[in-house]
Amino acid sequence: RCLPLSMRMLIVKDLRVFRRDPVQWSQFLVFFGLLALYFLNIRRFQYGEPLRRWMNMIGFLNLGVVGLILSTFTTRFIFPMISLEGRRFWILGTAPIRRETILWGKFWFACAGSVPTCAILVLISDLALRITERSLSVLLVHQVACCVLCVGLSAMAVGFGARLPNLREPSPSKIAAGFGGTLTLVLSSLYIIAVILAT
């Protein structure tokens, strides 16, 4: 409700386009479902006493895994969003809204999908590793780093998607596999490494 009406309508449009394509959301559910199963079963792994000292490091590695999966998804799903407007892009161009509103709408759409999902997965990981019993501050750092990763990766995917569009290609997978998608994925990986090292 805090967003302007025009931006909300653009987000609803993107959500409906995403929902109507079962190939898109089924891939999303499969990968994040497998990741959730991994994090839910962390507690069943038998950790010896030497490995218990490395629980915080395992938590940060799990945060990095979530970031890498998210970078793959932002490159695959968010990067092609501008390009998928294709030949209909002139309709958005003639609409009585600023072009920045279109980009901000796609950015908030990406953030709304990535932040809750990734934050819950990282929280499940930390609870399974019993990091909260050792240090609550590490849990908070993981959540902040997760939000930083989600916002940054969403912004990179939307920005590069707008800067390097391919308006003639109807297939999102081919758009993501092009030069712009590859560049986005490489820079996203460097961004993840920088955030994890900083934390």
Image (tube, rainbow, N blue to C red):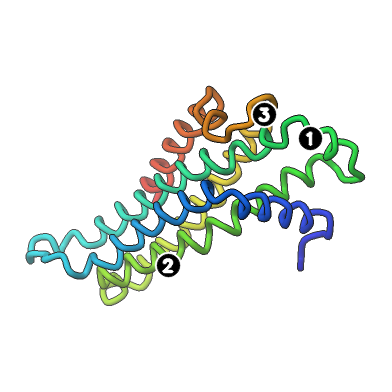
The mark lying in front, picked from 2 and 3, is 3
Q: Which mark is residue 88?
A: 1
Q: Is residue 125 left or right of residue 17?
A: left
Residue found 45% across the figure and 63% down from its top: 143
How far apart marks 3 and 1 lie (CA) works out to 18 Å
Q: Nearer the viewer, residue 138 or 18?
A: 18
SS at badge 1: helix
The amino acid beneath tag 2 is: Leu
* The quadrant where residue 100 appears: top right
Are discs 3 and 1 less than 8 Å apart at CB? no
Q: Earlier in the sequence, mark 1 or mark 2?
A: 1
Q: Residue at x 18, y 59 (%)?
A: 54
Residue at the disc numbered 3: 163
Image location of residue 145, percent across then percent down: 45, 56
Quarter of image, res 51: bottom left
The secondary structure type at the circle numbered 2 is helix
Q: Which mark is residue 140?
A: 2
Locate the N terminus and report the quarter of the image it occupies: bottom right
Looking at the rendered structure, the kind of residue marked 1 is Arg
For marks 1 and 2, give the CA distance.
43 Å
